[in-house]
Image (cartoon, helix red, strand yellow):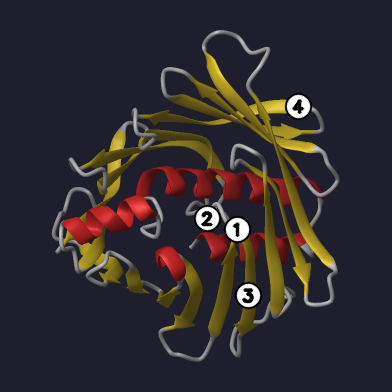
Amino acid sequence: MILLLINALLSYGNNCVGSMKRNLLLLLFLCVGRMAFAQGDFTSAREQRIIAKRHIKQITCYYFANAAKPTDSVLVDSLGFYKTGICLKQSNIYRYCNEYGAKNRLVKQTVTTKEKSDQTITMFTYDARGNMILAETVKRWQHIHTPYPDFTQHRFEYGLKNELLREYWTTFKGQSIQKQRYEYVYKGLETEFKKVVNFYDEKDQLTFTKKYFKNGTVKDYSIDNGKSTFAAESVLNRNGDLLKFTDHYHFDTDRAKAKRETITEVYKYDRYGFCTKKETYKNDKLINYYNWYFY
């Protein structure tokens, strides 16, 4: 899902500039941030060990569109695991097939539409510390036409603390598509802060800031032409799992005229650290929720 969001961002970036592109960047940061916090990626060594220990063969996720009617559920995700804990297949609106290499690291992912007409293949490369440093993607789309190149390289650069410093996307010929730079601030902060992470675009302009507090709170700010806007707030537990996420920048597109609203998501976990439920509230009213089941 993260790769699909990134692809959408880059395709959009080729055609749009200014505040519209910045809004999509903000959406990407908010979406990726809370997905990474809440669900993990099921490919890390920790998740694989827990899955193998519990002998989990399948994880399913159901979406309950109407909170007042629990029977109105839709299967939105299904993941299949091998006995060692690695995720081999995933099926939602797309079908995922994963292949692993040394130390059970994901080295190839094939994403196919259910009609099997469109396909994306991504190859992953890692450094000696286990950090992903390259993702090469080949797209074979027959029914979806976008300006995004059919072949791209997504590169990552890390610092001494294994913190992501830069990531950039290029075409097969090395032409730059998109760049992002990250700056981590630990010193000179007020006592309640743990760290601050700044995000810079391809023009090296500050576009986004995440402020991490020692009490587990994370506040997100969008920066546009030097103006800072409070966009979202997260609450994490001691393990870094997302307990609550409030999006102050949500736009209700279901209405005739888009209206900015505040949406709150609440996450619940089992004793092993896996997310089992996500509840979504609008104006303090429960509007929908997701349930994860482990077999």
Mark 1 in CB contact with mark 4 (< 8 angstroms): no
Residue at point 15% right, 54% down? 70
Mark 3 in CB contact with mark 2 (< 8 angstroms): no
Q: Give the residue type that dot 2 points to.
A: Gly
Mark 1 vs mark 3, CA separation in Å: 18 Å
Q: Is residue 147 left or right of residue 144?
A: right
Residue 245, relative to residue 156: is it above or below? Answer: above
Q: Label 3: which residue?
A: 137
Disc with the residue nearer the chain's start (1 vs 3): 1
**Disc 3 crowd, CA 10 A, few/some/many (<14, 14-19, 20+):** many
Q: Give the residue type that dot 4 points to.
A: Lys
Outermost residue, front direction? 128
Mark 2 in CB contact with mark 1 (< 8 angstroms): yes
Q: Which mark is residue 127?
A: 1
Q: Nearer the viewer, residue 275 or 285?
A: 275
Mark 4 vs mark 2, CA separation in Å: 37 Å
Mark 2 vs mark 1, CA separation in Å: 5 Å
- Please, what secondary structure does the residue beneath circle 4 have? strand
Q: Give the residue type that dot 3 points to.
A: Thr
Q: Position of residue 209 (x, y in %)?
A: 65, 31
In this rendering, does residue 3 appear at all? Answer: yes
Q: Nearer the viewer, residue 126 or 39?
A: 126
**Disc 2 crowd, CA 10 A, few/some/many (<14, 14-19, 20+):** few
Q: Is residue 181 left or right of residue 240?
A: right
- Please, what secondary structure does the residue beneath circle 3 have? strand
Q: Give the residue type that dot 1 points to.
A: Asp
Mark 4 in CB contact with mark 2 (< 8 angstroms): no
Q: Nearer the viewer, mark 1 or mark 3?
A: 1
* Snapshot quadrant of residue 207: top right
Residue at point 26% right, 48% down? 274
